[in-house]
Image: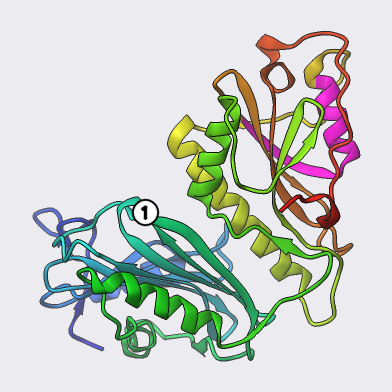
Amino acid sequence: MTDVRYPKRFEVNRLEALGDDPYFPREEAASRFEAGTLVTVVPDGAVLWRLSIASSRFPFDGERRFTLTHFTAAKTPLSEVQWESDGGTLVRRSTLDMFYPEGDPGRRVPYAGIITVRQRHFTDGILQVRRSSPIDEDRFAEVAVPQGGDRIDAPAFGAWAALVEASAPADVQRFGLDAINAADAYAFELGSQGDPVLADSRWRSTAGARDIADAVDALAAGAGSTIPRIERGEVTILPISIQGGARTGVDAGEERKRAAATADEVKGALEHRHGQEIAFELGRAGHDSVAAYAAALQASGATSVSWWVVEGAGVALVRSGDADVGNLAVAVHIVPGAWVSERRALDGTEVPALDWTRADIDD
């Protein structure tokens, strides 16, 4: 593919290269690609797609992440597909399709105001599909699909055509009121292409990150929520996902990726509303309420915790367990603010057990 350019800086809303000398020569762009430095590729003409290539690991060891976004002629995003290199192949990791019930806005708009269908692809054959809408609750499906269908050969520098074609958006109605039903039908079709991932002890909330953030705000303010939760004294646990035991055919590394993606979505929603997360010190020693909560978290197998204070309540995003053992889990805790904030800490606090299983969930 020779009819492309490599912008030095690219304005993602106007889809324009910036500066008086806006493009890298092909040779310089190729050197950046080989070094794992960010490279942007656009067509030489109307920008109907944009390819962003960056290192997926630090320090760079040859592995790359390719993100391909398609647009309308009016500069509205249609879809975004993310691939990661795995040796000589690219593995599709996520696909995001956008639907605009109010018509083509002619620009990029916040996802919260449109309908999206996101697919997360995993190399052990599990596909997650979530339809999110500002006018309805999320719909979620997790299915087992044939492996290998989301791989293509890794491109040499400049050979972008196959990647652009493999990332082309689905031919579905995306604008106007008909887009509402089109998004539902598209998500249903995607979720019907495999068998449901079933296990008595495995569980994944159907609530999306926005719904979980809504529930956090309501519960922190003393109101109710329809999202499944576990009550333990002064602790409210919002379970998000639990591995439910190691299973044949499921890769532990992919389980970790699933849990990380889920936790990152919730973290992003909470940060959007309540600011930057604060890392919780799991190893904190002492006799105050923060140390007591830290000890209970450690006893439950927590591996990483971040927190916010919302309406005076502590909100903790908790990642726990071990994918190799089969007890990997993600949850949000709503606790007294004195349990997470050193400035609010109190002495003589007792914290209940924080571990949980599928059987504890009241849904």
Please report the residue visible at 49 percent of the width from the left and 37 percent of the height from the top.
271
Q: Of helix, strand and loop, which one carries label 1?
A: loop
User: How many C-alpha atoms fall within 10 Å of the one at disc 1: few (<14), some, or many (≥20)?
Assistant: few
For the image, the number of numbered tags is 1
Q: Amino acid at mark 1?
A: Pro
Visible residue check, residue 70: no
The magenta segment is 291-307
> On screen, 121 above or below 255?
below
Where does the N terminus fall, quadrant-wise?
bottom left
Q: Residue 141: name its quadrant.
A: bottom right
With 321 as the anchor, is 189 left or right in this view?
left
Please report the residue visible at 45 percent of the width from the left and 34 percent of the height from the top.
273
> On screen, 361 above or below 323?
above
Residue 187: image location, x then y, percent: 46, 76
With 43 as the anchor, is 305 left or right in this view?
right
Please name whichever residue, 226 or 76, is drawn nearer the observer in this view of the structure: 226
Residue 304 lies in the magenta stretch? yes
Name the residue beneath numbered marker 1. Answer: 134
